Amino acid sequence: MPTTLSFTPNLARHLDCPGAAVEGSTLREVLESYFESNPRMRGYVLDDQGAVRKHVAIFLNQAPIGDRIGLSDSVADGDAVFVAQALSGG
Amino acid sequence: MSDRLLVGTRKGLFRIERDSARRWRIASNWFLGDPVSQLLIEPGGRLHAALALGHFGVKMQRSEDGGAHWGEVAVPTYPDRPAGVEDKDPMRNIDIPWSTQLIWSLAVGAPGELWCGTIPGGLFHSRDGGDQWQLVRALWDEPRRKKWMGGGYDFAGIHSILVDPRDSAHVTVAVSVGGVWTTRDAGANWELIGDGLRSDYTPPEMQQDPLTQDPHCMVQCPAAPERLWIQHHNGIFVSDDAGANWRELTDVVPSSFGFAVAVHPDEPDTAWFVPAIKDEQRIPVDGRLVVNRTRDGGKSFETLDVGLPEGPAYDLVYRHALDISADGRRLAFGSTTGSLWVSEDQGDGWQCVSTHLPPISCVRFEMA
């Protein structure tokens, strides 16, 4: 059972961001899998060095991820990843 | 004669048009709610707008049809930072992000080519009109680049890019804070220039160091490309040899401090400034918003205020928010308090377009 990935509706102002069921054993793999079909999304979520943007938050099963730079958090089948707009930075 | 302006603001992009009654009015808008940090209007009319989304990063938008349709195009991005490379802000000893924080300047180069200056200090070059960008490694890897430091922003940035109209391989950029740099071979080799620039915010023995200079804005006279003007943190400077040497203009009333400068396209001795109180207050002197104009290369200045607020005003005009039309007759400037003025007679008189726009970052006349 793959991981469910979904995005804040705030992103829909800028680009299509349908949720998806994607494969991967780490958060990095999950996101990279998604970016293959939606490459524009990468620059909205990650900075030039591949870290989570300062004012973006990512939740793994309702808890903030631990590694915002390396995205090494382990992801298991059936997990849910949600990319949110942080309350800061508007 | 240009009858249209583009105005980039903290909350969107606006077009201002002159109507049949000679009134300048807000005609249209795009990207409402999103910060627009910079604009570029190519000679053929193609438009570029740089957005600085608060959450989702810098984006570039381009229009081929005068703004009827916009599409997102490539953003200049930094290469992967090699492991073990130390790159720290020299004043605070914190890591310089190898990630585009802000598009601070855009310029047209050789046919089809563009230049882009960013915070944290990278200069980018596009050979295909902005479809792809490459970091100019020769400048980024120049050892003295690591001595650049932030001024108004946390990290250094390139805010002014001058492409010599006689030779598009001759490009001169200004860095806040990091001086003036020039290349004669389209970016392969760079020279730090700027003898005569002076900083009074550094220890005395560093004040003449070209590397510690904080030019706020640098412009070039298209008809006389050896003539450059700088509105510097420390005052106003003028060069007659494309930036190699500068002379400081002192005793400018009401102030030689400010951010913006515009030069007449055909008259190198004619330039405009919007003075403010230095350093940290950055409001008009005595609450009087005025424009300063010289017609004699800085020997004397006229203070222009017809049509500007009679009562107290606290508008500050940023470095990209003063522009002159290609024929040299019209000027426009906008403020961080969202006011916008246009002059049809080189600043003798001003028409207020609005006092209710969002904070204004850049103003550009469109082509006639």
Image (cartoon, coloured by chain):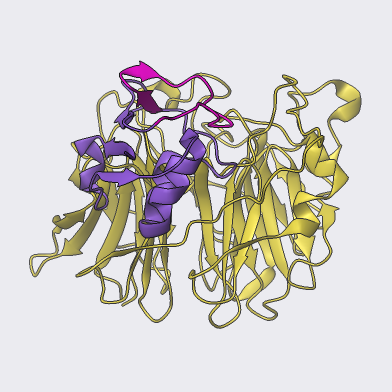
Chain colours: A purple, B yellow
The image quarter in which residue B310 lies: top left
Name, please, the residue furthest toward the top: A63
Q: Taking A16 as reference, is B347 left or right?
A: right
The image quarter in which residue B283 lies: top left
* Residue depicted at 47% across the width and 28% down the height: A54
Q: Does the image show residue B303?
A: no
Name, please, the residue furthest toward the left: B21
Q: Does the image show residue B283?
A: yes
On-image quarter of the N terminus of chain B? bottom left
* Residue depicted at 39% across the width and 55% down the height: A40
Percent from the top left, x then y, of residue B43? 43, 78
On-image quarter of the C terminus of chain B? bottom left
Q: In the picture shown, does residue B149 fall above or below B133?
A: above
Q: Taking B198 as reference, is B133 left or right?
A: left
Name, please, the residue furthest toward the right: B205
From which residue to which does the magenta span run?
Answer: A56-76
A55 in the magenta segment: no
Percent from the top left, x then y, of residue B38? 43, 52
Instruction: Give the mark count.
Output: 0
Percent from the top left, x then y, of residue B115? 58, 64
